[in-house]
Structures are given as C-alpha cells and as structure tokens.
Image (cartoon, rainbow, N blue to C red):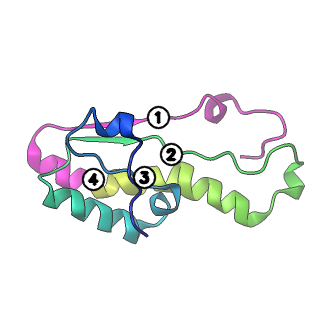
Amino acid sequence: MKPQLPPRRFARSAKRILWLSKRIFAEWKDIEKSFAQVQKLGGLHVLINAAGITGKTNILTQEVPIADWDDVFAINSRGIFLSCLTALPIMEKQKYSRIVNIASVAGKEGNASMAA
C-alpha cells in the first residue's frame, strides 16, 4: 500500500511528514517500508500515533464479528506498538526525538454499545 498524503494544513506546517492510512498502520511490513522511506529523507524526529477506530457500534458484544474485533486491536494497539518498535532504532541514533501517542477518551472510559 502507498502512504496517503496528509491534509494540506499539515503539509504546510512541516517540512517532511509521512501520513499512514489505517490499513498501512496495521501491517508491520508496510510500516517498515514507510519508515525506510523516512530514513532516506533524513531521519525521524517526531512520531505521532493518532490512528484509532471504534469498530461496530450499537450492537451487543455477542454480535460483534471477530474480524471487526481483530481490526480494532490491529490498529488501536498493535499498530501503535509496531510503529514505535520500528521508529525507536531510527530515533535512538539521532540523540533527540519524541513519540506522542494520542488516544480517545473512549479507550479510557468506554461507551455503551461498543465492545472494544
């Protein structure tokens, strides 16, 4: 999969930005490929993980398809872990970098009729 371009408002505020779609975020080989592109541009100084999906809503837990459950965790948990895991070796070489993980309050408190 090819990385998506960021919205213009982000592109103006940064010299280099890599925008990963949620599908890329869930696959380690795609994350590694994307970070390899970033290294060619001169390194990685800030990683912002802000991907998140809710999955199906307004259904009972026993009605949630397993594939939907897997998608939620692939993106919301595994994707963040894999992007950090891939970014850390690049960032450690630079002696200065930051990782920012952004989550929804729904991840902390949950909502009625949402299984994950």
Label 1 secondary element: loop
User: Which residue is painted at 54% across and 54% down in the image?
Assistant: 75
User: Which residue is painted at 63% across and 53% down in the image?
Assistant: 72
Instruction: Work out whether mark 3 precedes mark 4 in sequence or the reverse, and give the earlier one.
Output: 3
Amino acid type, residue under disc 1 in the picture: Ile
Q: Name the residue under label 1.
A: 102
Q: Name the residue under label 3.
A: 81
Q: Which of marks 2 and 4 is in front?
A: 2
Measured Cα–Cα span from mark 1 to mark 4: 16 Å
Q: Mark 4 points at which residue?
A: 87
Label 3 secondary element: helix
Instruction: Work out whether mark 2 precedes mark 4 in sequence or the reverse, and give the earlier one.
Output: 2
79 sits to left or right of 45: right
Image quarter (top left, top right, bottom left or bottom right) of the N terminus: bottom left
Amino acid type, residue under disc 3 in the picture: Phe
- Residue 62's image quarter? bottom right
Measured Cα–Cα span from mark 2 to mark 4: 16 Å
Report if residue 15 is visible in the image. yes
User: Which residue is painted at 44% across and 50% down in the image?
Assistant: 80
Measured Cα–Cα span from mark 2 to mark 1: 8 Å
Image position of 44 with respect to 40: above or below? above
Instruction: Work out whether mark 2 precedes mark 1 in sequence or the reverse, and give the earlier one.
Output: 2
Q: Mark 2 points at which residue?
A: 51
Residue 111 got which mark? none
Inspect the magenta stretch and tell me whether residue 82 lies in it: no
Amino acid type, residue under disc 4 in the picture: Ala
The stretch of residues the image draws in magenta is 87-116
